Image: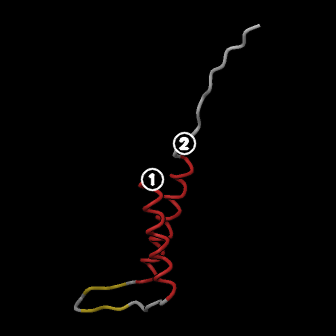
């Protein structure tokens, strides 16, 4: 079962694929700007951070052992 982080990463990857499959120009409508390049950059940065978080999820650990002779 996928974790919440893995699900979020999958959703971001899907959105990146959608955006890059049919790129759109930046535009302004009624004073609202849509900057697709900035949006893609934000998604790529989010993907990088999520991937790092998933790698660190298990994190370093310490294992104590005891030897008997």
Vertical position of residue 28 compared to residue 53: above or below: below
Q: Which residue is mark 2?
A: 58
Tell which of 29 and 63 is nearer to you: 63
Tell me which residue sits at (27%, 92%) in the image.
29
Tell me which residue sits at (67%, 14%) in the image.
66
Tell me which residue sits at (50%, 58%) in the image.
49
Name of the residue lying farthest toward the front:
1
Q: Which residue is mark 1?
A: 3
- Disc 2: CA contacts within 10 A as few (<14), some (14-19) or many (>=20): few
- Distance (Cα) linking label 1 and label 2: 12 Å
What colour scheme has been applied to the protein in the rendered image? secondary structure
Tell which of 27 and 51 is nearer to you: 51
The residue tagged with tag 2: helix, strand or loop? loop
Image coordinates for residue 15, horizontal then vertical, percent: 44, 76
Vertical position of residue 39 compared to residue 46: above or below: below
Name of the residue lying farthest toward the top:
69
Tell which of 25 and 69 is nearer to you: 69
Nearest to N terminus: mark 1 or mark 2: 1
The residue tagged with tag 1: helix, strand or loop? loop
Tell me which residue sits at (57%, 51%) in the image.
55
Image coordinates for residue 48, horizontal then vertical, percent: 53, 62
Name of the residue lying farthest toward the right:
69
């Amino acid at each position: 079962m996928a974790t919440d982080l893995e699900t979020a990463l999958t959703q971001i990857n899907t959105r990146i694929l959608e955006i890059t499959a049919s790129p759109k120009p930046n535009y302004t409508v009624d004073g609202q700007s849509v900057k697709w390049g900035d949006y893609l950059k934000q998604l790529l940065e989010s993907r990088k951070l999520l991937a790092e978080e998933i790698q660190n999820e298990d994190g370093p650990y310490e294992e104590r052992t005891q030897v008997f002779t």
